Amino acid sequence: ETGVTQTPRHLVMGMTNKKSLKCEQHLGHNAMYWYKQSAKKPLELMFVYNFKEQTENNSVPSRFSPECPNSSHLFLHLHTLQPEDSALYLCASSQEVGRNNEQFFGPGTRLTVL
Amino acid sequence: AQTVTQSQPEMSVQEAETVTLSCTYDTSESNYYLFWYKQPPSRQMILVIRQEAYKQQNATENRFSVNFQKAAKSFSLKISDSQLGDTAMYFCAFMKRDAGGTSYGKLTFGQGTILTVHP
């Protein structure tokens, strides 16, 4: 285990649903990240938070809405998704952006959009 | 922008043998980090090895070592004495580092190489 947990591990939702993905890290880190992993494509960075402040939005559609209430928790709120959004969503954390460069990853949430 | 290319979608090796995974990258940065991450079938990605571009010496971690060729922008991973537990997808990744010694925290990944170790 890496010290980063994600729930749920699997999620199936319709295009009109609203759901949220949750990530929690137990490492005392201050930076958290969302990545999207699609089949046959490299991991794509979506969002970066450093000390609860969003420092990166990698041109992600507004149907994905991140929230970072504290340094230990990160959410990804989903609404009106498209089938092409089906993917594995990975959360990661690091000591902070700009200091420690190792990122620790969670197990991911496998999302299927019908 | 940086790009990372892993030209081998799949590789296989017999247990106890050695295998090398290839990675090339393209960047105009002079200061950066390179990583190999392993993602086993359980899906939790873990760091295997890290190389700092300013260091000429190749990084090693037990059975894992890299061949870092900065001029050629090549960063291959060698796994010696392969074990069944090495079966996983392996990702090469790049992170730029500014002149002040801080990184931006943005990993750019390659497409991955699926490695299967056969008994």
Image (cartoon, coloured by chain):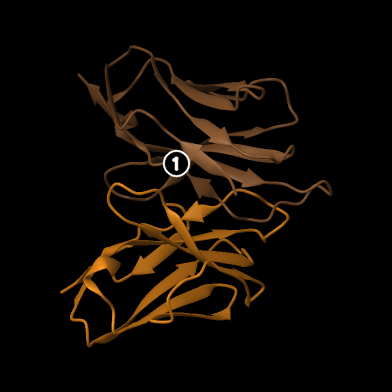
Chain colours: A orange, B brown
Q: Which quadrant: the C terminus of chain B?
A: top left
Q: Nearer the viewer, residue B87 or B103?
A: B103
| Outermost right residue | B100
Q: Is residue A18 visible?
A: yes
| Outermost left residue | A114
Q: Going 55% across and 26% down the picture, which residue do you hit?
A: B75
Residue B16: image x %, image y %? 32, 13
Q: Going 44% across and 25% down the picture, which residue do you hit?
A: B22
Quadrant in which residue A70 is drawn: bottom right
Residue A88: image x %, image y %? 31, 60
Does residue A14 lie above or below A51 as drawn?
below
Does residue B22 lie above or below A29 as drawn?
above
Quadrant in which residue A106 is drawn: bottom left
Q: Nearer the viewer, residue B104 or A100?
A: B104
Left or right: where does residue B55 sit relative to residue B40? Answer: right
Q: Is residue A111 visible?
A: no
Q: Going 44% across and 41% down the picture, which residue do you hit?
A: B110
For label 1, the residue is B110
